[in-house]
Image: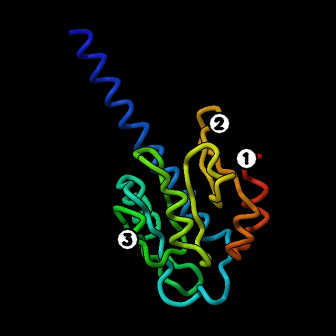
Amino acid sequence: MKRILFLIIAIVSVGICNAQDAKYKAMFISNFTKNIEWPASERSGDFIICVVNQNEVLGQLKTFTNGKTVGTQPITVVGVKSIDEISKCHILYLSFADSKGDKLELAKTKLSGTASLIVTDRPGSLKNGSCINFLLVDDKLKYELNKEALNERKLQVSAYLENNSYK
């Protein structure tokens, strides 16, 4: 009986942690729209945020961005099941929680030559081409920047975002 109770508590705790994690990631991603400048060629139509296979983050992002804009562009949050479904994204959130294979390499190839911000959550992703990577530091969600990848994609980062990144 104690084992079953412990197991139930553990499962519920993991669910709560995942929900909180998703909420904070969605808040960060939403705030990235305010602290990154996309090239003029990307400032028409909808501002599209793509989320690959992360329903918790997808739902939270839709809540945070509902009715909001980036400049004059209405924000649209799109959930996709695979990299192959992506056509245009201003921001791509790519979680490795359920990853089998190298989704980052596929995403970089698919979005090559575009001004797409690629956001990941796997240690070491910056050196593999991610623009922003989430990490846990002392049980707090932080982010790190890859200035080279941001420059390659012609994305300008605010001083605020740069100064508050994990170094």
Q: How many marks?
A: 3
Quarter holding the N terminus is top left
Point 76% across, 64% down: residue: 148
How busy is the neighbourhood of tag 3: few (under 14 within 10 Å), some, or many (20 plus)? few
Residue depth check, mark 2 versus mark 3: number of the one nearer the observer: 3
How busy is the neighbourhood of tag 1: few (under 14 within 10 Å), some, or many (20 plus)? some
Mark 2 and mark 3 lie on one chain; the one further toward the N terminus is 3
Q: Which residue in the structure is indicated by mark 2? A: 137
Residue 120: percent from left, percent from top: 55, 54
Residue 139: percent from left, percent from top: 59, 33
Q: Which residue in the structure is indicated by mark 3? A: 85
Mark 2 and mark 1 lie on one chain; the one further toward the N terminus is 2
Point 49% across, 89% down: residue: 45
- Residue 62 badge: none
**Secondary element at image label 3:** helix
Mark 1 and mark 3 lie on one chain; the one further toward the N terminus is 3
User: Gap in Å between the C-alphas at discs 2 and 1?
Assistant: 9 Å
User: Gap in Å between the C-alphas at discs 1 and 3?
Assistant: 32 Å
**Is 160 situated left or right of 153 in this image?**
right
Q: Amino acid at mark 2?
A: Val
Q: Amino acid at mark 3?
A: Glu
Of residue 15 and residue 105, the one placed in the foreground of this image is 105
Residue 109 higher or lower than 146, as above or below: below
**Cβ atoms under marks 2 and 1 closer than 8 Å:** yes
Q: Which residue in the structure is indicated by mark 1? A: 166
